[in-house]
Every structure is written in structure tokens, then in C-alpha cells.
Image (tube, rainbow, N blue to C red):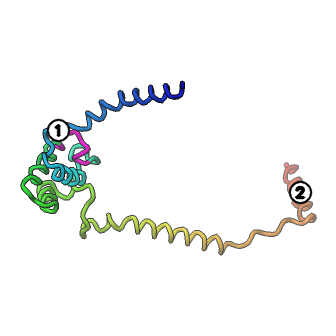
Amino acid sequence: MNMCRFLAASCVGFSLIAAPALVLAVDDPMEMLPNPQDEARAEAIGSQLRCLVCQNESIEDSSAGLARDLRRVVREHVAKGENNQQIMDWMVNRYGNFIRLKPAFSFSTLLLWCMPVLALLLGLVSALIFYRRRAAAPPSPPPLTEEEKARLAQLTKDKDNAP
């Protein structure tokens, strides 16, 4: 019985804490499109566009004023009936490739897209070189015999007693 009360109190407490955060996630419901399909498409496009103020957030996640303006522009283009590619092209023409959170594959971004494969190959080649060198290393010498140990002890003793 006490466990049920604790869980119920925890749920109420969490709701009280989480509710303001959910309200803050939506900047202005007036900027949403009336058609839910168009709104979903505008959100999908906006989630691919970088906030130029926050830089690692999409314009849908950012609460910056510029992000709000860009969301409005995206919704205007969606309302005009433009397709996703036309809207992305307009944004790239206006703000450059930096506006894309996921850059398009082109000659200028070739190194960026190939870097994970190059890093993996470099790691594999480094590991291969390391293991080949390790395998080619001479075997460790055999342990000292009793006679050699006695000789070593005598040499060490003579060195410690030398003036």
C-alpha cells in the first residue's frame, strides 16, 4: 500500500516538473500549419536545417529568434505547395550548405563523407602493422642457469664493493 502511494506521488511530482518543460518546447502554436500533414512535413524539413545561432540544433529544436523566423519561412514554402527539395534548395541558396545538418554528398564534401571509412582503414592497417612487428620480434631469451645466476650475483656483489 505504501509502495502504491509512493509511485502515485512520484508520478504527480514528475508531472509537475515535466509540464513546464513541455510547454517551453513549443514556442508559439500560432506558427503551426492548420493541416497536420503539412505541419509534419514542415517539421521534417526543419529538423534537417541547422539553427544558425545555436549551430548544433535544428531550427525545430532551437528557441532562437532566427530559428523561429526560419521555421516560419519553411511553413510559408510548405503552404505554397513547394516540394521538400525546392524548399531545401531555397534554403541552401539563401544560407549556403552550412544550413544543412546533414551535408549533401558532393566533391567538396567527399572527404567528410569518406572520413569514417578512411579512419577505419587506417586503424586496421595500424593494427596489422603492430601485430606483424610483434610476431616478428625475436623470442625472449631462455632463463638463466644456476651457474649464470651465481656469476651474475658475483658480478653485482663486486660492483657494489668497488670504491
Q: In this view, does 112 lie to the left or right of 150?
A: left
Alpha carbons under labels 2 and 1: distance apart: 87 Å
2 vs 1, front mark:
1
Which dot marks residue 99? Answer: none
Q: Is residue 132 left or right of residue 15?
A: right
Q: Which residue is drawn at 89% across and 53% down?
A: 157
Q: Earlier in the sequence, mark 2 or mark 1?
A: 1
Q: Is 5 drawn above or below residue 77 in the view shown?
A: above
Amino acid tagged 2: Ala
Q: Which residue is drawn at 26% across and 60% down?
A: 103
Is the stretch drawn in magenta largely helix, strand or loop?
Answer: loop
Determine which residue is flagged by label 1: 29
Determine which residue is flagged by label 2: 153
Answer whether residue 65 is magenta in the image. yes
Q: Residue at x 9, y 52 (%)?
A: 79
Badge 1 local density, few (<14 within 10 Å), some, or many (20+)? few
